[in-house]
Image (cartoon, rainbow, N blue to C red):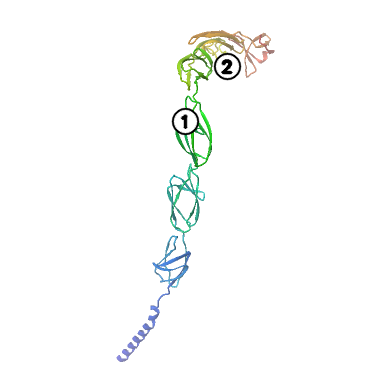
Amino acid sequence: MADRENRSFVARAAALALMAVATVPAFAQAPLPGVIRVTADPAATLWVDHRPQKTAEAFTVEVPPGTPTVLRVSAPGYVTQYRTVTLGPGERRHEPFELEHEPIPVLFRSETPATVLCDGAELGETPFHTFFTEPRAYRVVVRAPGFQDQAIRLDLTNGKPRVVDATLVADSATLEVASEPAGARVLVNGVEHGRTPCTLDRIRAGAHTLSIRLDGYKPITHDITVAAGDKVPLDFALERLPAGLTVTTIPEGARVYVDGEFRGTSDLTLAGLPEGAHTIRVSLPGHEDLSRMVTLKGGATQVEEFALKEIYGTLSVQTQPGRVEVWVGGKRLLTTRPAQREGFTSAIEQIRLPPGPTTLTLKAAGYADATRTVTIAPNETVSLRVRLTFQPNLEVKTALGTYRGVFTRQNGDGSLTLELKPGTYRTFLPGEIRSKRFLTPTP
């Protein structure tokens, strides 16, 4: 019995051993590799886990499954790209690479600071460097004030760094200006550039107006046309001017006397005066006279300015009635005001007037105009009191009688108010008015 049991155990053990041997190949079989299809634009060199492959546009690479694989794609003139991929057993994948151009450094230089433009767009001012992203030919213009534009064909098709040295040519001429005597101001197109003798650089090609100015000498105006690169010597002989005098006053219009002789009204320029000392006096009504001694030099025009001080008198005005307009010519100077409410006499008003006679016209509604002439001395006060003649301008008839007075106002209820005599008022109701008419002023 025991022998049979032992044989059965051995048989079972043998069967299990055979089964174990039979199943070993199934578990030990190697997994299928992953397959990567790599494409590059443009053609490039592929590196797989740092191992270089051939240079081409497309690659097929087997990689172990489950293991990260580093792909590197590079080409001259392009930015190298890296990518890490992990594939499963038997997995297939496409990895496309589009390479970007590597920036191309370019340094721009010029002796004169200049602006660099590329295809019409401003890049910067020399010296500076920049990067171009495409290896092709570019149109570059270098520009600076006072110089001709320089056009440059910048060929970067080989992708190599470049240094561009611009040599600018002046777009201007040079003027060498002298005068006798020296020290004259030199102006080109109205802009001062120095004093003779002087050298004027960077005069743009074309027509210009040259002016030479020196006090005491006749100014010279010279038209000139130059081309770029010209060097033009210019020498001027200046003509001496006679002695002259310009008199200006504030305000204008003053009478000007030279050595006691009336010569005109300011602003005034006199030529051909003898050298030496002269007395100038200016006079303007309402202003203080001014005089001074001046010394004139031959060949020079001397400017003398006088600021005239106004002088006034004061007119003190009081009127009856209490509100009167005071006019001089066509200008109203003031309007008097009642000294008290409803008062007949005005407050005293004061006004400044220039010295001498002044004719005043005084006006008030319902009164005849009055004319007065006053003469005022400098810094003097003159009093004027005027009583205007009452002059009715409206007649109203009622059952009680006829009334004449100065129309004062039309009231909202239809009544009207008359000033019957200076300071005396009456209001007429609509029911009591039989007629009314305006009176013609007596001349």
Cα–Cα gap, marks 1 and 2: 58 Å
How dense is the environment of label 2, judged by Cα within 10 Å: few (below 14), some, or many (20 and up)?
Answer: few
Q: Position of residue 376 (x, y in %)?
A: 52, 9
Residue 410 found in image quarter: top right
* Tag 2 residue: 331
Query: Which residue is nearer to you in this view: 391 or 151?
Result: 151
Can residue 353 be seen at all in this image of the molecule? Answer: no
Extreme-left residue of the structure: 2
Front-most of residues 310 and 351: 310
Looking at marks 1 and 2 on the same chain, the residue that comes earlier in the sequence is marked by: 1
192 lies above or below 308: below
Does residue 338 appear left or right of residue 437 in this picture?
left
Tell me where residue 56 appears, x and y as whole percent. 47, 67
Give the residue at the far right of this rendering: 435
Asked if disc 1 and disc 2 are in contact, CB closer than 8 Å, the reply is no
Q: Quadrant of residue 103?
A: bottom left
Query: What's the mark number on residue 179?
Result: 1
Q: Position of residue 76 (x, y in %)?
A: 44, 62
Task: Identify the element where label 1 is drawn.
Answer: strand
**Residue type of the residue flagged with mark 2:** Lys
**Which of pointers 1 and 2 indicates the residue nearer the eye?**
1
Please tell me whether residue 13 is drawn above or below residue 333 in the rendered image.
below
Residue 129 can be seen, yes or no: yes
**Which numbered marker is on residue 347?**
none
Residue 193 position in % (x across, y down): 46, 34
Quadrant position of the N terminus in the picture: bottom left
Q: Quadrant of the C terminus?
A: top right
Determine whether the residue tagged by mark 2 lies in a helix, strand or loop.
strand
The residue at 53%/32% (across/down) is: 222
The amino acid pointed to by label 1 is Ser
Q: Is residue 331 above or below residue 100?
A: above
Q: How many marks?
A: 2
